[in-house]
Image: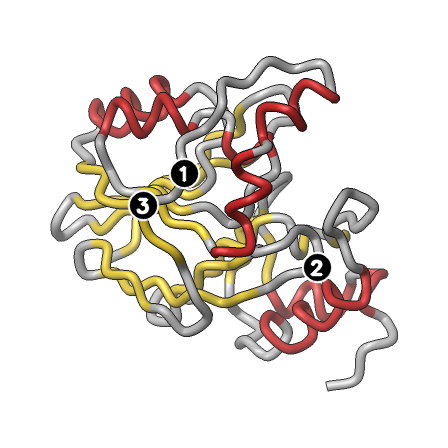
């Protein structure tokens, strides 16, 4: 069974998720936003063995704790190949916003649309959802009815596209083809703010009013 723990971390209150299998106590950390040692300590104190570090994308506020978490756990880092260049520049991007960030480590493995990652008995399906950032992916657990969707779709909002690599048309295509095709009851866990559902966003998100499915 899925156990999901959210931590809102760092200067932009970015959501970091621990996605765990309570049958095996194996877990993945998705988007180690900040304070990697704190993330590792929380996992250890609750009996989780971190087997994967997964990135939805490489904006600095989603990878601020990556180096510390990698050092503390030794778990492999997974990212889409189109996110690698942005990940390598994350410390410089943070500096432009007035924040210090040590250069993050590179990924150990690369993700692609259709990959299925095993975390204990959980199965995380990789959906390639660019538009907010190059190489953005979401992690879908169909058996558990959950989607960790990074900065693609929020409660009553969408990801911004005015940052380098952003593309509004591509973002809306990702939402239309990869997220709004999921069951209405699917729980969405975004990179900022509170969870929502596909059905609620389809019905009430003001940015999606022109979609026809």
Q: Position of residue 201 (x, y in %)?
A: 70, 63
Residue sitting at x 68%, y 18%: 95
Left or right of 208? Residue 178 is: left
Dot 2: element? loop
The quadrant of the image that shows the N terminus is: bottom left
Give the residue at mark 1. 106
Dot 1: element? loop
- Tag 1 near tag 3, CB within 8 Å: yes
Residue neighbourhood size for the residue with mark 2, other residues' Cα within 10 Å, grouped as few (<14), some (14–19), many (≥20): many
Alpha-carbon span between mark 2 and mark 1: 22 Å
Q: Position of residue 173 (x, y in %)?
A: 72, 72
Mark 3 against mark 2, which lies toward the viewer? 3
Residue neighbourhood size for the residue with mark 1, other residues' Cα within 10 Å, grouped as few (<14), some (14–19), many (≥20): some
Q: Position of residue 152 (x, y in %)?
A: 65, 55
- Tag 3 near tag 2, CB within 8 Å: no
Q: Position of residue 129 (x, y in %)?
A: 60, 64
Foreground pick, 96 / 206: 96
Give the residue at mark 2. 131
Dot 3: element? loop
Q: Is residue 54 above or below residue 38?
A: below
Give the residue at mark 3. 108
> Which of marks 2 and 3 precedes in the sequence?
3
């Amino acid at each position: 069974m899925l156990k999901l723990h959210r931590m809102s971390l760092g200067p932009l209150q970015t959501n970091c998720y621990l996605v765990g299998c309570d049958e095996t106590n194996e877990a993945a950390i998705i988007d180690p936003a900040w304070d990697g040692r704190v993330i590792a300590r929380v996992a250890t104190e609750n009996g989780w063995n971190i087997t994967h570090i997964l990135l939805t994308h490489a904006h600095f506020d989603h990878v601020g704790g990556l180096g510390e978490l990698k050092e503390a756990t030794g778990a492999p880092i997974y990212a889409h190949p189109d996110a690698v260049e942005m990940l390598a520049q994350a410390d410089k991007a943070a500096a432009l916003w007035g924040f210090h960030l040590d250069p993050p480590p590179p990924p150990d493995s690369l993700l692609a649309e259709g990959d299925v990652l095993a975390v204990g008995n959980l199965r995380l399906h990789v959906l390639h959802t660019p538009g907010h950032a190059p190489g953005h992916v979401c992690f879908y657990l169909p058996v558990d009815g959950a989607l960790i969707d990074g900065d693609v779709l929020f409660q009553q909002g969408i990801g911004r596209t005015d940052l380098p690599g952003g593309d509004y048309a591509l973002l809306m295509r990702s939402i239309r083809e990869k997220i709004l095709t999921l069951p209405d009851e699917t729980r969405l866990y975004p990179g900022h703010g509170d969870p929502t559902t596909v059905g609620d966003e389809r019905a009430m998100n003001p940015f999606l009013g022109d979609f026809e499915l």
